[in-house]
Image: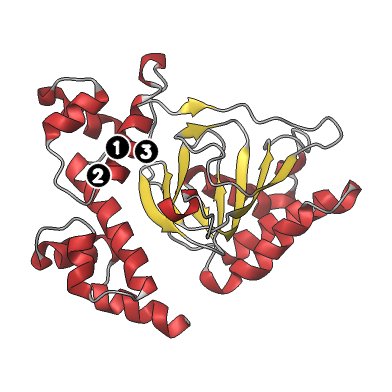
Amino acid sequence: MKPQLLKVSNHPVNSFNARRDNVPYINNRWHYHSEVELIYFKKGNGTQFIGDSIKRFRSGDVILVGAHLPHYWKFDETYFSEDQKNNADVIVVHFNESFWGSTFLNLPENKPLKTILEKAQRGVVVQEKSKKPIGEMIESILFSEGPRRLLLLIESLLAIEANANPNLLSSIGFRHNFEETEKDRINAIYNYSLTNFKRKIPMEEMAAVANISPNSFCRYFKSRTRKTYTQFISEIRVGHACKLLIEDNMNVKQICYESGFQNFASFHKHFKMITGKSPLSYQKSFLQKG
């Protein structure tokens, strides 16, 4: 499956790009680029795909994605409704690892910068307690000029290195395939799965979406993602269940079926396998934070 190469536009006045997105469909597809991406979801919830990692993202999250690491931010459907009840507010920074010169990162004082950019090759998420101050620092880049702009980027990266979640997002063995003929398959599979995960999806149906034979689909999917399609769809369902548990508008049994699981035992098993917690423990940990 082929991520799309995205060309990031740079303003001729600045050495790196920083922008604010208020619509949920900017680059809303599986893509990669040669620049490192630093993203702050000031407002926004949905499903994130980084390498072979599938997790929820939510308002306040700060994530660093390394150069050439495929990623995809799929906002929840409520952000696309006509009444626009939910508005996205996302600050995105793109920079080339060598924009400050070929020797800068090799200076002994810059070892922490080099370390966090190496970690970014697998995707880095900031720990809960540090998200707000780092997010505000990233946002201030938008309103800064000259050397202060560069210093804010460096300070943001150093803060992320000091406060990064030790669990990197994508697995160490993840590799993506760049064959031109496959460039749209990942989008078709992801979008179809995200639209239909609440029901049982026959493999023949997914094979038709991917435009390959049913006998080849499972083997093909695992060879490209390092996981089975069953694992993939379970992660999407558990991610949706996490969202519903945090919202706390349904009981756990209702959430089980609303997330596409056919029985409670299966839901509990897959939820604990993926999150490390039972559904109730996961919900309790978030409600306590509120």
Q: Kindly check if marks 2 and 1 are in contact, taking CB atoms under 8 A apart as contact.
A: yes
Question: What amino acid type should be assigned to the residue bearing mark 1?
Answer: Tyr
Mark 3 to mark 2: distance in Å? 26 Å
Q: Residue at left 17%, top 62%? A: 257
Q: Which mark is residue 174?
A: 3
Q: Nearer the viewer, residue 290 or 152?
A: 290
Q: Answer yes or no: is residue 281 visible.
A: yes
- Residue 181, image x, y percentages: 37, 14
Question: What amino acid type should be assigned to the residue bearing mark 3?
Answer: Phe
Task: Answer above or below: position of 18 versus 138.
Answer: above
- Residue 67, image x, y percentages: 57, 36
Q: Which mark is residue 146?
A: none
Q: Report which quarter residue 130 is drawn in.
A: bottom right
Colour scheme: secondary structure
Q: Which residue is mark 1?
A: 192
Q: Is residue 7 left or right of residue 289?
A: right
Task: Answer above or below: position of 132 versus 17.
Answer: below
- Quick one: SS at disc 2? helix
Q: Is residue 92 left or right of residue 27?
A: right
- Residue 187, image x, y percentages: 38, 32
- Quick one: SS at disc 3? loop
Mark 2 to mark 1: distance in Å? 6 Å
Q: Mark 3 or mark 2, which has the lower sequence index?
A: 3
Q: Kindly check if marks 1 and 3 are in contact, taking CB atoms under 8 A apart as contact.
A: no
- Residue 263, image x, y percentages: 9, 63
Task: Answer above or below: position of 39 versus 283.
Answer: above
Tell me the crowding category of disc 3: few under 14, some 14 to 19, or many 20 or more residues within 10 angstroms, Cα based: some
Question: What amino acid type should be assigned to the residue bearing mark 2?
Answer: Asn
Tell me the crowding category of disc 1: few under 14, some 14 to 19, or many 20 or more residues within 10 angstroms, Cα based: some
- Say which of marks 3 and 2 sits in front: 2
